[in-house]
Image: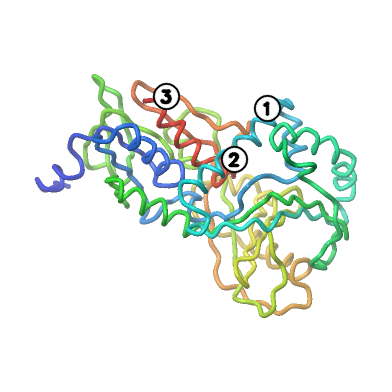
């Protein structure tokens, strides 16, 4: 494919900073670079017509965390590391809200609930036993809060679960589409190029430049390259990251829907929320971990049928509903929750492995990625 003189000159010549991926991390990195380098040419390359991983496909949870998740993290992290993980989420959410504004992303702090099925009684009892311990631990992050988690009676009368739930009154939710649209608009206003359907397929560092191929056909170069593709980063990095597909569905509007907030079930492998008068429901990758370790956007009968079953029997019992649409997104996960933030080659840097917490930590990770320069 041959580019015209105008195409080459306008978009692909004299690039200072090239960024792979137009999700939360990539666009946050671009905006942070613009603050530091007013006259730099910044180009974001996105292989999809929209961000292809999870940034426009996630459930819109603030991703603070549930009690069972925190206890699970304490199995592989020290108390200090856990406190840092939570601090990073709080800091990232605050930065996102400051950068875009709560109204622009429809941020609402309706609280988060962890539900426990009958077969999870042991997990519930363990969480109850550790409740005071975790609340005391989190005072290092929330010094102005007496407690983050509390026990309350299920206010929504779900079925087939314990009638007591764990409530996180600091958890919030937002509109993923509005969030990404606001980020894109801000990039455009700051003279940042975003090139969609334009995939960087390979790159090499040569003589203080990074040479790369676009769609395996067009050659270009930049002074520095930033990898912000998260779930798709494995193709570029020989490191501890694995793609993880998350499948989601959303109902058509339900009259007089009372459910409000974010919800976790079965150690967080299932999650749902209200969005206006609909229920958005996702998860189930633990039903077949191997099949969901993929970068292919798609759906499986196994997961989708289980999601519908739980909607019928637990979340919306005796309530008629119809499924409006279904989709999937690709996360980047690993054995360790801390993101991978490092220089991988001369003038090439990565900020990946957000572990399903992209909404919470994407803004700060993008800023940290830009700070390599």
Alpha carbon distance from label 3 to label 2: 20 Å
Q: Which residue is mark 3?
A: 344
Q: Secondary structure at mark 1?
A: helix
Q: Is residue 126 above or below residue 265?
A: above
Give coordinates of residue 49: x percent, y percent.
36, 56
Quarter occupied by residue 83: top right
Dot 1 or dot 3: first in sequence order is 1
Q: Residue furthest front?
A: 144
Q: Secondary structure at mark 3?
A: strand
Residue pictured at 52% horizontal, 48% vertical: 97
Residue nearest the viewer, comparing 165 with 342: 165
Residue nearest the viewer, comparing 204 with 113: 113
Dot 2 or dot 1: first in sequence order is 1
Residue pictured at 63% horizontal, 58% vertical: 282
Quarter occupied by residue 135: top right
Label 2 Cα crowd, 10 Å radius (few <14 / some 14-19 / many 20+): many
Question: On the picture, is 50 further left or further right than 267?
Answer: left
Q: Nearer the viewer, mark 1 or mark 3?
A: 1
Q: Is residue 24 above or below residue 79?
A: below
Alpha carbon distance from label 2 to label 1: 15 Å
Residue 100 visible: yes
Q: Which residue is mark 1?
A: 81
Question: On the picture, is 47 further left or further right than 313?
Answer: left
Quarter occupied by residue 76: top right
Q: Which residue is mark 2?
A: 355
């Amino acid at each position: 494919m041959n580019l015209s003189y105008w195409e080459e000159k306008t978009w692909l010549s004299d690039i200072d900073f090239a960024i792979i991926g137009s999700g939360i991390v990539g666009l946050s990195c671009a905006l942070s670079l613009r603050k530091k380098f007013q006259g730099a040419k910044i180009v974001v390359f996105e292989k999809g017509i929209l961000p292809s991983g999870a940034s426009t496909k996630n459930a819109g949870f603030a991703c603070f965390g549930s009690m069972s998740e925190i206890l699970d993290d304490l199995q592989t992290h020290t108390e200090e590391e856990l406190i840092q993980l939570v601090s990073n989420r709080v800091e990232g959410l605050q930065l996102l809200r400051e950068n875009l504004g709560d109204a622009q992303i429809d941020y609402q702090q309706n609280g988060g609930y962890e539900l426990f099925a009958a077969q999870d009684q042991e997990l519930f009892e363990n969480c109850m036993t550790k409740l005071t311990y975790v609340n005391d631990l989190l005072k290092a992050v929330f010094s102005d809060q007496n407690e983050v988690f509390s026990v309350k009676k299920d206010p929504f009368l779900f079925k087939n679960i314990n009638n007591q739930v764990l409530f996180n009154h600091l958890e919030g939710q937002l509109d993923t589409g509005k969030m990404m649209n606001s980020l894109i608009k801000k990039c455009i206003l700051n003279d940042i190029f975003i090139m969609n359907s334009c995939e960087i397929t390979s790159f090499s560092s040569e003589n203080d430049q990074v040479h790369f191929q676009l769609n395996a056909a067009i050659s270009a170069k930049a002074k520095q390259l930033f990898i912000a593709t998260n779930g798709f980063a494995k193709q570029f990095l020989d490191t501890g990251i694995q793609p993880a597909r998350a499948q989601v569905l959303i109902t058509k509007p339900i009259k007089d829907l009372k459910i409000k907030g974010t919800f976790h079930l079965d150690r967080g492998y299932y999650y749902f929320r209200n969005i206006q008068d609909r229920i958005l429901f996702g998860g189930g990758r633990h039903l077949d971990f191997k099949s969901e370790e993929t970068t292919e956007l798609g759906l499986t009968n196994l997961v989708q049928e289980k999601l519908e079953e739980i909607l019928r029997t637990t979340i919306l019992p005796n309530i008629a509903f119809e499924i409006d649409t279904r989709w999937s997104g690709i996360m980047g996960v690993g054995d360790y929750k801390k993101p991978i933030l490092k220089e991988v080659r001369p003038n090439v840097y990565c900020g990946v492995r957000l572990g399903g917490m992209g909404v919470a930590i994407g803004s700060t990770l993008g800023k940290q990625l830009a700070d390599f320069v």
